[in-house]
Image (cartoon, helix red, strand yellow):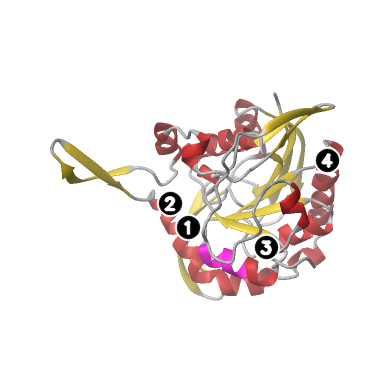
Amino acid sequence: MVGAGSHPRRRARGLPDRPHSRKRHHGTHAPAIEERGACTRTSGPAWQSPRRRGRDPERARLAGTGSASVATGVKVGAGITVRTVRKEDWLADTESSYDTVAASYAELVRGALDGHAYLKSALSLFADQVKACGGGLVADVGCGPGDVAARLDALGLDVLGIDLSPRMIDIARKYHPSLRFEVSSMTDMQLADGALAGVLAWQSLIHVPDEAVPAVFSRFHDAVRPGGRLQLLFHAGEGSWLKTEGYGGHPMNVRVYRRQPDQVATLLGDGGFEVQAQTILDPGGEAPQAILSALRLP
C-alpha cells in the first residue's frame, strides 16, 4: 500500500497527492494529446474546475447539475443583481440520503462482490479493455465507500473514485487511503475533456431522472478519450418508485429508476458511444440488472 502522502502514479500524471480534506485541486493546463493505436491518449492534469474546462452554464442548468438559479436576487451595486443558486432537488435528495445511510451502506456492501462471479468478470473485462487501449486514468462514478475502486486498483488500473455524498467519500478515504477520491456529481465532473481512459458507473444512474440521462452521457463522452471504455450497471425493467427507507432502516428520499437495456443503449448511441455487449443478470428474478459495455466513438 502506498501512503496517501506519496503516490507515484499520481505524480507521474502530474496530479497532486490525494488530499486529506475535501478541497479539490484544479488543473492549470489543457491536456496534451498523443496517438496510441486506435485510442487517443491524454496526458497532463485531469481534475479541473468548471471554469477552466469552459463549462457552459446553460448546459449545466439543463443537465440538472445543481446550477439552476432561484428567484432571490441580491443587489451588490447599481443595476447589478447576483442570483443565488441551489442544487436541483433530485441531486440534493440523493446527496442527503446517502450521507445519512453511508456507514450502514458501507457495512452492508463490504465483501459483497465476493459472491458475484458475473460482476467480478465484468470488472476484469473492463480492466482488460482499458489496458488494451493503452491504459490511463479511469473514474469509478458513484463509487460509494470505494470497494469497487479498490478492486479496479487491484486489477492494475489507475482509478479515481467520484461520489456525490461527502460522507461516502470520507469512508472511502478511510478504508482505501492509497486511492484518490473526490466529491463530485456525475452531471458536472471536474475533469478535463478526454482525461479518462474509461468510466465505470455501477448503479449510479438509478437515481437520475430520465430527462437528465442524456446530459450525463454527454459528460461521460467529454471526459473519456476516443477509443476509451464505458461500463454501466443498472436496474433492468420499467418504472420507478420512491425509496423512503433503506440500509439499516435509515430515512431516505430518492426515486429509483428501472430502465430497459435497449433504451439505455439507444441513449448511449445518441451520446457518441457504441454498445458492444449487453448482459442481463437474474433475468427471471425480482430485481434483474443489466450490464452494458460500450466504446467511446471519435
Q: Are marks 3 and 1 in contact (CB under 8 Å)?
A: no
> What residue appears at the point 48 percent right and 44 percent down from the top-left corner?
209
The alpha-carbon separation of the residues under discs 4 and 1 comes to: 31 Å
What amino acid type should be assigned to the residue bearing mark 4? Answer: Gln
Disc 4 marks which residue?
129
What amino acid type should be assigned to the residue bearing mark 1? Answer: Thr
- Secondary structure, mark 3, is loop
Horizontal side of 226 relative to 82 (left or right) equals right
Disc 3 marks which residue?
146
Quarter of the picture containing the C terminus is: top right
Disc 2 marks which residue?
90
The alpha-carbon separation of the residues under discs 3 and 1 comes to: 17 Å
Disc 1 marks which residue?
94
Which mark is in front, 2 or 4? 4
**What range is drawn magenta here?**
166-171
What amino acid type should be assigned to the residue bearing mark 3? Answer: Gly
Residue 24 x, y percent position in the rendering: 53, 54
- Secondary structure, mark 4, is helix
Residue 175 x, y percent position in the rendering: 68, 71
First along the sequence among labels 2 and 3: 2
First along the sequence among labels 3 and 1: 1
